[in-house]
Amino acid sequence: MSDDPSRPSSGPQSDPYPVADAPAWWGALGRGDLPLDGEDADEPIRRPVAPPADPPQRLAAAARSIRWRRLWFNALVLLVALVIVCVGVGVVSVSMFLTVALLFGVPLALSAATIAVVARRSR
């Protein structure tokens, strides 16, 4: 309960914030340097203009472009990782390269795909 005295439930209610005088800024409305109503009406009101929205086709094309760039970047990173592994193992023949690619490339590709799926779903 509040400490305020109770008011009667019926009858006219008194104003809780009585105002005896006009606010302090009221006198400033008559200043001479303020424009009168209707002055500068020929000057247009400047409002910021939003750029037109891109059409859905352009947005879809941009999304496809970004998706392909991500795919190529991931493939390039996997290829560099595979080359580093091949140099570290000491690959000297094509059959040895294919063996190393299967042993190390498949887990690398699976981990990259898992990371991509988790990153996409967490957004």
Image (cartoon, rainbow, N blue to C red):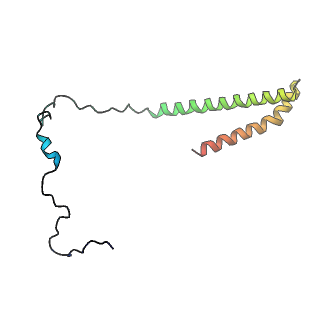
Q: Position of residue 30 (x, y in %)?
A: 10, 40
Residue 4, image quadrant = bottom left
Which residue sits at x=19%, y=28%? 43
Number of numbered discs overlaid on the protein picture:
0
**45 sits left or right of 89 in the view:** left
- Residue at left offset 87%, top offset 26%: 91
Residue at the location (69% across, 42% down)? Answer: 114
Q: Which quarter shows the N terminus?
A: bottom left
Residue 37, x across and y down, in percent: 12, 37
Taking the spot 16% from the left edge, 30% from the top edge, the residue there is: 40
- Residue 41 x/y as whole percent: 16, 31
Q: Residue 55 location in percent, x, y? A: 44, 32
Q: Determine the image quadrant of residue 34.
A: top left
Displayed quadrant of residue 72: top right
**In what quadrant of the picture does the C terminus appear?**
top right
Q: Nearer the viewer, residue 50 or 36?
A: 36
Residue 3 located left or right of residue 86: left
